[in-house]
Amino acid sequence: MTVDGWIQIVALVVALTALTPLLGGYMARVYQGERMALTPVLAPVERTAYRICGVTAGEQQGWKEYARSLLLFSAGGWLVLYLILRTQGSNPFNPQSFAAGPWDLSFNTASSFISNTSWQYYGGETTLSYFSQMAGITVASFTSCATGMAVAAAVIRGLGRRGTDRLGNFWVDLTRSLLYVLLPIAAAVSVFLVASGVPQTLEHYLHARGPTGLAQTIAVGPVASQEAIKLMSGDGGGFFNTNSAHPFENPTGLSNFVEVLLMLLIPAAFTATFGRMIGRPRQGWALYAAMLVMFLGGTAVIYAAEAHGTPAQHAAGVHAQVIPGSAGGNMEGKEQRFGPAGSALFVSAGTASGDGAVNSAVESYTGLGAGVAMANMMTGEVIFGGPGSGLYGMLLLVVLAVFIAGLMVGRTPEYLGKQIQAHEIKLASVGSLFVPLLVLVFAGVAVATPVGRQSMTAHGPQGFAEAAYAYLSQAQNNGSAFAGYSGFVQPVAGNIGAHGLTFADLAGGWVMMLGRFVPILAVLALAGSLGPRRIAPAGLGTLRTDTPTFVIFLIGFVIIFAVLTFLTVLIIAPFAQALTSQLLS
């Protein structure tokens, strides 16, 4: 570990903490319909969109109507994306003349990006045309992110309002998320990335000859525009197969820092939005503190593990810095320009934020480093999590934590002055436990059946880790991959002769959609149940949820929740390699 590495981590914390109340306050004004600097420019566009879609902006929806609108919009988006992928060969902006991929791969990909997961069984530069990347993947990244943000806004209203079960209007929240938050930030980030050296072009791939005279094809395309929303949306699917390790996605140390910040920015800002909209900023800071402490703990462990090296490197004597100017530590699968610190910070942010973007190969990490990356997702993607989904996922756990704390100290379970009853506990339990159940069932089927093992390329702890990581990442809508677990066989670029592995594609697609929408339905129902409930004044028996004591309790609860659910998976898979000096394949 180096001073430079720790400076990167500290600088990120300072920047994130400074920007959280600024962006969070701005988003609170957006969802409350207040006038802002962008209003004169964007309000006419907003009103036009409502007229075209037949939306009455002032019409409020209960949780069932809100959920129905959300599911209808998502189903329509899935169908459009699937059709774009299936008709790729006849669509415009296809200079490489790529044919459509297999139907089962298209099913998996459409499910992935509509569910805000960005799981990719394919390499973007060898599989998708420019049109599929722009009109399909990029648009879905915007809309799936805005959907999660809209749900978070609705949940905040349900917790903060009294005497009504109205949660807002899905179409209004969706439109405002897109117009006032995502598009302006994405435009600014795209300009920054282009200035940093990221391509933005519709020209053919480049052809060149290297120093040895061998011909090579250099993939380019409309990368910067997709990269911007990929990082801030929770859809971390890369334009290139190597994601943000590719120099055309992440060319410099500065771009690496900005990309890490972007993955965390909107999820962190939602804690401030929450505090502002309910009129209790301390509640938002309490959630932010809990998320930040868990993120820093995970980042420190991953960094220390990667700087220390693997048992194999120690056995070979190559774990130390043996080349002047090199980073040292475990550099397998990492870019020299980022080193262990920049790589650990990026992977920690990607697995904690729900984005899934990576700038290094997670499967090449030490057992401990990879295990912590998995543990970040095992918490339920609440260590910041995805935009909107991280907040409402954390609120589900807060409701459970308040209930358990009330049982422990003999106090009536309350949150924000609203009494928590059996109905809310059932909904919070469904929203929190359904996804782990998906992971354990499908990972078990994948390693125990011949049809599931077709996708595995390794055995032993590594093979189990690959399968478990795949379904964990898909169910938690993260999208990062441990590699080795495949759903697509592609002999050559362009999809000619390619075929999908149907079990992995279909199972993964359903896991991603169920993992996305079942918790959304549960948390909307919870917000709809709490909305009409009166707010009782705080008294001597009230458990305060904005104090350091509760923050510590919440952190402990989240960790215990994840450990009790997934400890066996961690021990069998990555920790088995971390706790032994034996070299395991």
Image (cartoon, rainbow, N blue to C red):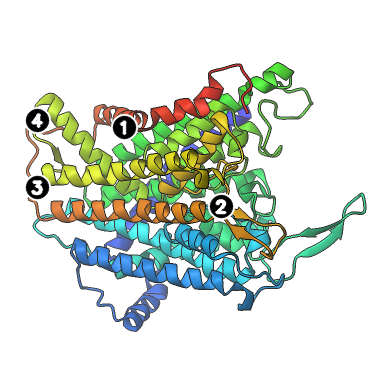
Would you say the residues marked 4 and 2 are in contact, meaning their CB atoms lie under 8 Å apart?
Answer: no
Q: Tell me what residue is drawn at x 74 percent, y 30 percent.
A: 326
User: How far apart are labels 2 and 3 at the CA level?
Assistant: 50 Å
Q: Is residue 352 left or right of residue 160?
A: right
In this figure, which residue is indicated by the disc labeled 1? 561
Residue drawn at x 51%, y 40% is 467
User: Can you identify the residue that label 2 sits on?
Assistant: 487
The residue at the point 61 percent across, 45 percent down is 256
Q: Is residue 422 visible?
A: yes
Mark 4: secondary structure: loop
Query: What distance separates the C-alpha of mark 1 from that of mark 3?
Result: 29 Å
Of residue 457 and residue 399, the one placed in the foreground of this image is 457
Amino acid type shown at disc 1:
Phe
Residue that carries the numbered disc 4 in the rendered image: 411
Q: Residues within 10 Å of mark 4 (few under 14, many from 20)?
A: some
Query: Residue 357 at x, y = what percent?
Result: 54, 48
Sequence-first tag of 2 and 3: 2
* N-term-proximal mark, 4 vs 3: 4
